Amino acid sequence: MKIERVLENGFSEDDFWQEDEDIEKKWLPRWAIVCLVLVLVLGLIVFANVGSEDDLTLNVVSVSRGHVVETYSANGTIESERMQVFHSPVSATISELNVQVGDTVRAGDLILAYDLENLELNYQQTVLQLEAMRYGNQATVEMSEQDQNRQENDLRQQNAREASLRNEIAAIDDEIVRLRGVEEAQAEAINLRIADIQADRLANRGEYGRLFAERSNLVLALQGLHIALEERNEALAQIAYIDALMVELDDTLRELDVELEAARLASLSISTDERMNAQQERANLNFMLANLETAPTFPMPNPELTVGQIQSMQVSEEMLELSVLSAQELLERAEEGVRAEFDGIISSLLARQGSTAMQGGALFTLVSTQDIIARLEIPANDFDRIVIRNEAVIQLGGREYRGVVERVNRVAVPNAFGQMVIEVIVSIENPDDVFVGVPTRVDLTVAERHDVLYLPPEVVNMAASGHFVHVLVNGVVERRVVEVGISSNHQIEIIYGVEDGELVVAEASAGELEGVQATPLFRE
């Protein structure tokens, strides 16, 4: 048999002590106060009949063996240990709202749905932006390659032009050298010819001089009278011959002078025009080459993309890819709507159908109907009576729920009335149809004994020396000292002092009847 003892708020007002004339105290429960008057009246009747009768009838109870449970009662509040505020996963218009405050929902129930039009448009725009960026980056790479090829071609052409000019200059230098060789050869030939002409001229002049001298001698000889006629004629003939030779020599000398002058003029104009033209062309080529080599160069942008530029384009694409994934995820989450993650009750509702929910904004609050607790406050002096994992009975709306002590706060704090209290959390098993936020009464099991002797609390007395009872032994009332253990409203554990099945007097005046012969009357 299991009987419970209720101690209001941890204080033992249920039991009280009454001191008699022998300084004896009797422990009676609160409900027995009403019966005390009747017991006293019965005692007076018994005393009135003691002297007139030899046998007395007394109410007795039998010492029993069974299960004794001591409980501790406290008031508290039913709460949900799991409360979650649901936030909007997207920024979108709420197209459907299926709950109101106080509605009970099951895990997976659709609480609200979104209008997907703007989210779908945003997703498509993000996808197009990613494609545009990829095309743009590809165009940048291709343009960079084209510019690089163009610059390489320009550089090759410039190098080829410089090489061509150098080759042309080298060819002209060779032509100038050749022309100078020709000029030198011509000059040498002319000089040799001049030398020959001069030699011939000198020889002719010598011959002319010789002939002139010979003629002069002949002329002088002719002037002599002693020259014979024949000799004279011979001399004249010789003079005529010499004159003819001298005329011929004069012609020859004149021709030589003309030829000498022509040779001299020729020596001055040997290939001059051709060589001058070649030199002029060489100067022009040198000028063009110098312009190519010394032309001012400006820093040209490197057409080749740097590692940083390539990485920047890659990062930009990756960021936009993340935006696409984010937009896709938002669209998918919006398509799913917002569903209850667990069984519970809608305790608050901020969402409104037709309004725009902002991403991260609170929509509603859901309190679990499965993780239900009773939150208690007990006096700090009773901290040692509460044991974690002990059983509890929760009284709520005419129903009883089973539970266990889940947590005990190890710090006492003042309550609203300034009393130091300790918070106790009792978890409720199978909390079906429980109302959250309502007051409740909880009976906590603080001690439990199995297969022990027990008696009703009202038959156990207490004096300064300890507890005692009156036992009817062989029809005679005798006082018996006992040691008590735990107790409830209906039972008190007897550790020793009586045996199983012994009869204990259940009379308030039993102390006056010690040694009296009596007949037992079992109390119902």
Image (cartoon, grey):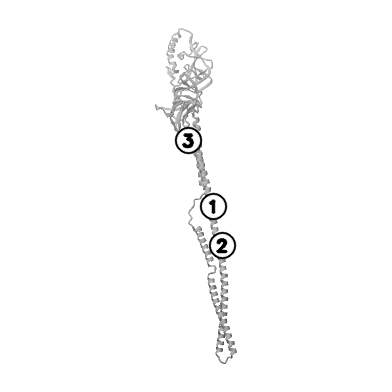
Q: Position of residue 246 (x, y in %)?
A: 56, 81
Give the number of the mark in front: 1 or 2. 2
Residue 334 visible to the viewer: yes
Q: Residue 347, position in %: x, y?
A: 44, 26
Q: CA distance from mark 2 to mark 3?
A: 72 Å
**What's the residue at 58%, 87% (across, down)?**
235
Where residue 456 appears, x then y in whole percent?
49, 17
Mark 3 belongs to which amino acid? Asn
Q: Position of residue 45 (x, y in %)?
A: 44, 9
**How far apart in space, not on screen, are marks 1 and 3 (Cα)?**
46 Å
Mark linked to residue 122: 3
Tag 3 secondary structure: helix
- The disc, 1 or 2, on the residue closer to the chain's N-terminal end is 1
- Of residue 11 and residue 265, the one placed in the foreground of this image is 265
**For marks 1 and 3 on the same chain, the one whose residue lies earlier in the sequence:** 3
Q: Mark 2 Cα within 10 Å, few/some/many (few <14, many 20+)?
A: some
Q: Considering the numbered disc 1 on the image, is that residue within a helix, a strand or a loop?
A: helix
Marks 1 & 3, CB-CB < 8 Å contact: no
Which of the two residues, 108 or 194, is positioned nearer the viewer here?
A: 194
Above or below 153: residue 286:
below
Determine whether label 1 and label 2 are within 8 Å by CB: no
Residue pointed to by mark 1: 153
Q: Which mark is residue 171?
A: 2
Whichever of callouts 2 and 3 sits on the residue coming sooner in the sequence is 3
